[in-house]
Each structure stands twice: as structure tokens, then as C-alpha cells.
Amino acid sequence: TEHQIDSYEELQLRLDAATEQRDQLSVSIKDLERQIAELTHIQKQAAIYRQYQPIYTQYQKARDKEKFLRGHESEIILFEAAMREMKQTKVSTQLASDHTNRNRKKLEAVLNQYYQDYRKGVDTIKELLVLKQNVDLLLSNSRENKMKDKTIDVG
């Protein structure tokens, strides 16, 4: 009665509900982690874009593009990849920095709450499982005692 559980069926229902809630939180956590990773990736691409944009502008203005390219090939490749990524996500580099940073922080706050709820759920499940095991043990012992009593009466 410590947990206000009056029957074995109610115990099983609570255990099933806690397990379902934990599983749903697990799915939500994975989804948020994926969203945060995407936002982090966009931020990284925006930072690369801003970092190498001056070099790319110099490259476009260079008289000898081949020579300039040989000297700055890795930076230009990184810039072009970041530019493609930014076009693909349809987010400007400034928006990517400000907007995604705010969104990422909001998602991280929600994620932290989900982690706390998940841990509480796991603790609840453990507690209910221990309770269920204790009840099962008591019921098992009770059945064994009844079987012994019947055996003695017959014998």
C-alpha cells in the first residue's frame, strides 16, 4: 500500500505504463538528439562559409585562377561544400548562426528535461519490478505452503 497499489493487476498496469512512457521518452530523446546534431552541423557549415568567404571572393577576382586555386584548394573546397549545404538547407549564414543557436539551446533544455524524466522512469520501473518480484515471491511461498498443507492432510 506504500505505492497505493491494491492489486497485482494494478501493479502490472503501472509497470506497463511506466515502461511505455520510458520507451516513448527514449524515442523523443533520439529525435531531439538528431535535431540538435542537424542544427550543430548547419552552424558548423555557416561558420566555415563565413571563414572562407573572403578567400573565395579573392579566388573569383584572381587573374590566374589556377594558381590561386593551387594555393588555397582546401579552403575553396570547404567553402563550396558549405555553400552547397547552406543553399540546400535554405538558411542564410547569419540566420544559421543566430536562429540555429537559439533553437539548439531550446532543444537542449527540452532534452535535459527528457533525460531527467527518463532517469526517473527507469527508477520507477526498477522499484515496481522489485515490488512485483517480492509479490511474486510471496505468492509463490503461499502456494507452496498450501500445497504442503494439502499433502499433509492427505498423507
Image (cartoon, grey):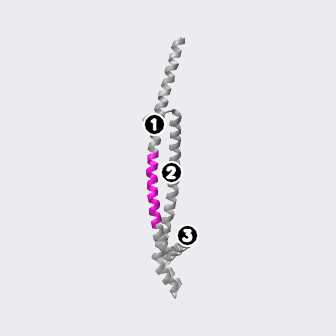
Residue carrying label 2: 25
Residues under labels 1 and 2: Cα distance?
Answer: 25 Å
Looking at the rendered image, the disc whose residue lies closer to the viewer, 1 or 2, is: 1
Residue 28 magenta = no
- Name the residue located 49 percent from the left edge and 61 percent from the top edge: 36
- Name the residue located 47 percent from the left edge and 77 percent from the top edge: 52
Res 71 seen here: no
- Helix or strand or loop: what does disc 3 sit on? helix
Residue 39 is situated, as x and y percent measured from the top left of the image, at 49, 65
* Above/below status of 70 relative to 36: below
Q: Amino acid at mark 2?
A: Leu
Looking at the rendered image, the disc whose residue lies closer to the viewer, 1 or 3, is: 1
Residues under labels 1 and 3: Cα distance?
Answer: 52 Å
Mark 3 nearby-residue class (10 Å; few <14, some 14–19, many ≥20): few
Mark 2 nearby-residue class (10 Å; few <14, some 14–19, many ≥20): some
Q: Main secondary structure of the magenta part?
A: helix
Residue carrying label 1: 4
Looking at the rendered image, the disc whose residue lies closer to the viewer, 3 or 2, is: 2
Q: Identify the mark nearer the N-term, 3 or 2.
A: 2
Question: Which quarter of the figure is the N terminus placed in?
Answer: top left
Stretch in magenta: 101-121
* Above/below status of 48 relative to 135: below
Q: Amino acid at mark 3?
A: Thr
* Above/below status of 126 relative to 26: above
- Helix or strand or loop: what does disc 2 sit on? helix
Q: Amino acid at mark 1?
A: Gln
Residue carrying label 3: 89
Residue 77 is situated, as x and y percent measured from the top left of the image, at 52, 75
